[in-house]
Amino acid sequence: MADAAVKFVLDQLSKLIREEYSLLGGIGDDAQDVMNAFDRLTAVLRVADEREEIDPQVKAWVKIVRELAYDAEDVLDEFLFRVGGGQRSGGFYAKINNIYTSVKNLRARRRLAHKLRRIKARVNHISQEQPSLLTTSTHPVHSYNKWWYDCRGDALLLEESDLVGIENPKHFLVSLLLDVDDDLRIHSVVGMGGLGKTTLVKKVYDDVKVINHFQYRVWVTISETFKIEVLLNDVITQLVEQTKQKPTQDFEAMDSNKLKEFIKNILSGQRYIIVLDDIWNINAWMAIKYAFPRQSFGSRIVITTRNSKIGSYTSNETHSGVVYPLEPLSQKDSWTLFCRKAFLGGFCPQHLVDIAKNILKRCDGLPLAIVVIAGVLATKSESIEEWKRFQSCLNIQMESNDGMMNMKNLLSLSYYDLPYYLKYCFLYLSIFPEDVIIEKMRVIRLWIAEGFVMENNQQQENEDVAEDYLNELHHRNLIQIVKNSYDGRIKGFRVHDILREVILSKSIEQNFAIIAIGQNIESSNNFRRLAIHRLNDHILKCTSSKMHLRSLHFFEPLSSSAASSSLSKMFTAKYIPLMVLDLRGAELEEIPDEVFNLFQLKYLSLRRTKLRSVSKSIGRLLNLETLDLKHTYVIELPVELLKLCKLRHLLVYRYTDEWSNPWASMQSFNAPFKIGELLSLQKLCFIQANDTHGIKIVSEIGKLTQLRRLGVTKLRHEDGKEFCLSLEKLTTLCALSLKSASEDDILDIQYPLRRVPHSLQRLYLKGRLERVPQWLSSLVGLTTLRLQWNRLVEDPLPFLQDLPMLAYLDLSKSYEGEGLCFKAKKFSKLKHLLIMDFEALKWIRIEEGALHQLEHIYLDKCKLLEQVPLGIQHLSNLKRIGIRDMDDQLMATLKPNGENYAKISHIPKILISQIIDGERKFFLINR
């Protein structure tokens, strides 16, 4: 991974030279020389990174390069601290201090210049050694994945009796290929490595119905490295064998265009099936696709790939192409496969059942992992102690057991295929504990703080670039999405346990990060990031010498004394280049003083701590970009916060348990009176709309033109016009949450906007409305809308029904009328509908053709509702209905055999809940 380390430091150098050249002074030329020296290395680093797995000499060279890149990064960080970190102020003593500081800076500049020259000399020296190492290597350039036994080809040889859980996917794909349709179709099977894509498609390819249906059948394995002429010759060889004719031309002498033409001539007018197995990039598809004619004879092309983006791209080239995402094995099939491979008779001894299921859980339905791990366990005795030892040292087994090493290296191919900027981002996920759901925005802010998110030419915000990175990892099937928002956005994800072991191993090997689970850490370990999953006092003692530590995460909640003790032990030096400090969950009531000495800190999380106030010293953290005080007790921030001109994300709010009072369920904060000076802010939640020092906070909000997420509470009637004037200026706003000061206060936001924030996707309005704001109908990008406690006297549906992207609609105590009518051909994208707390509502009508994509409807506390929505039987996509605390007579008719049950019986899941005799009763009816 030296290429990622060098590319990273090159980006940092480039940015420093471009933006801070005036500070560099006499070392500017040295910084440029170091940058040029590293740049000369990048041409061969990719090859070297691949070869380090097969050549110890190359591996040692790559390690030196990586450490050099780390050293250069350290010098840059120290330079910014020594030279760029001084604070200036007026007054005589300040002037004396500035003179003293400038003398110190001159000394620091000389010392750092000397360090840079030494790094440049070392880079030049290692560059001279590099050619001999790479040219004398006995292994071919692209053989890094061949030194271990590549078991991917075995998938073509498996017998049907060796497979589990393949029947349904095979039946689906066979029917897809035999579908009566003369047009060419391109289908793809996608999924992470080891999931069995090749195995499945091979069984489909060899199915007797498929063999009899197609006149020509060709299977081509493409893989990461390929030569188009070799692939085309392979296709021709298979076709010639099927024609049973001797070749009349010398294919070896043909170029790729002639070869494609030859293939096209054979296949023209024929019904064929082509399988392109293991495509890694679009270029492979572009290189071969024109060899296959597209006449309408019912031909099929099937692609297997780890990258769902490639699957979508290829399948979309023909009408009705299908992308089939292969799912992991079910628990039942996983257990069957595991027992079949681990035990001779296929049955697990009773005393091993629990430990076997715990081991199997780590495999998480991945057939490759199940087969390999079960195969290793088959060689062991059936003692609980031996199986427990295996479970506790699975990571060690992946480095020492041949079968486990092969599995690790096969899964590593996806890592090696990543571009350099994604390697760091992917390795970063190794710091999170097993089975943890990783929050999307958390990891995006962490990546940005660490400097992993590179600027691009499209002038995108770093947050957008980081989200693109995350989507790319998803497309490559390297992360598993476990939590989506109602409008389809990723909210939470995880890494497969076995894949996590792979990147954890690489992370430790590269000194990228280390995980502490109660064990001691040697002070000689040159790691850059520390994640403490289980606290041990010895850990804290030996990390105090880690002056190059960039990131520190506590995943185990700390007691107040442990937190103070640990930070005082770790942060004893004057200069610590820490950029990330995550103390979420610690029992802290105040921020430890040591934190305010972390000049380069960009990310500080004190989420879910017992913090009640923030010290004025917060103003010393001039580089802070994220301050996360969510779920703390902080309700006010000091004016010194306004010094943090780089602050992008300010989260200060807490949900309380007072659900009976919607105006007491959210704790927000009093902002400094000139909050509008924080011009870099992108997220500001939740701020109270108070007047301070004669300044209206709602007016200050209008100065924050970079805002993308805004939450405001305690809005008063008199704030409305001023807030709308501010809203006009927030042209990049994506999410807005407004809450009135009390149930009786009116959200006076109906004023016309000269400029509507068309970027707005999510809108939450809690509080009384005199009428629906006219500008709401113009929010063409709105996907999520919550109208709560609005008590409207006019029907809101006509204002909402034509919103083209609306997917989620929550109407809670929002309307005081007797009926709601959803018109035909309206709400075309709506999938989730909640209707709650309507005191006067008697009827709901859904015209045929309305809500045709609705999947979930929830009705709650509409006591006067006389029957289920009229027309609900037209909603063919409805998957779930929830009905709670309605009229008792109506509730009785909804259960099986009730007179209203027939109207909802087509819905797969029906959840009915009501209070009977003082106790809540639930009735879950699955069709």
Image: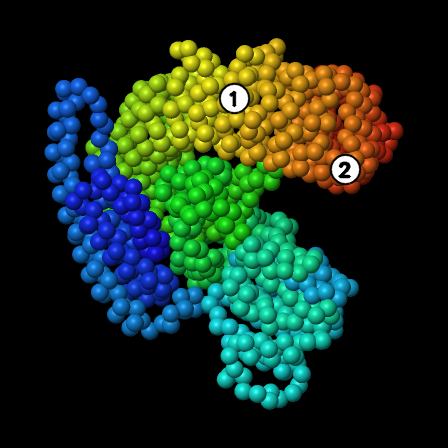
Q: Amino acid at mark 2?
A: Lys
Q: Amino acid at mark 1?
A: Leu
The answer to whether residue 341 of the structure is visible from this angle is: no
Residue at position x 33%, y 56% in the image:
2
Q: Point out the frontmost of discs 2 and 1.
A: 1
- Left or right of residue 294, residue 550 in this image: left
Q: Is residue 563 above or below residue 416?
A: above
Q: Is residue 392 above or below residue 727?
A: below
* Mark 2 vs 1, N-terminal side: 1
Circle 2: element type:
loop
- The x, y position of residue 672, in whole percent, is 39, 18
Q: Image quarter for residue 616?
A: top left
Q: Dot 1: within a 10 Å radius of its alpha carbon, few (fewer than 14), some, or many (20 or more) residues?
A: many
Q: Quadrant of the N terminus?
A: bottom left
Residue at position x 40%, y 66% in the image:
144
- The x, y position of residue 319, in whole percent, is 69, 59
Looking at this view, is 54 or 787 the one in front? Answer: 787
Residue 825 is labelled as 2
- The x, y position of residue 926, in whole percent, is 75, 38
Q: Are marks 2 and 1 in contact (CB under 8 Å)?
A: no
Circle 1: element type:
helix
- The x, y position of residue 797, in whole percent, is 72, 27
Residue 597 is labelled as none
Instruction: Give the Cα separation between the discs numbered 2 and 1.
Output: 35 Å
Looking at this view, is 36 or 124 the one in front? Answer: 36
Residue ID for mark 1: 725
Q: Is residue 321 above or below residue 585?
A: below
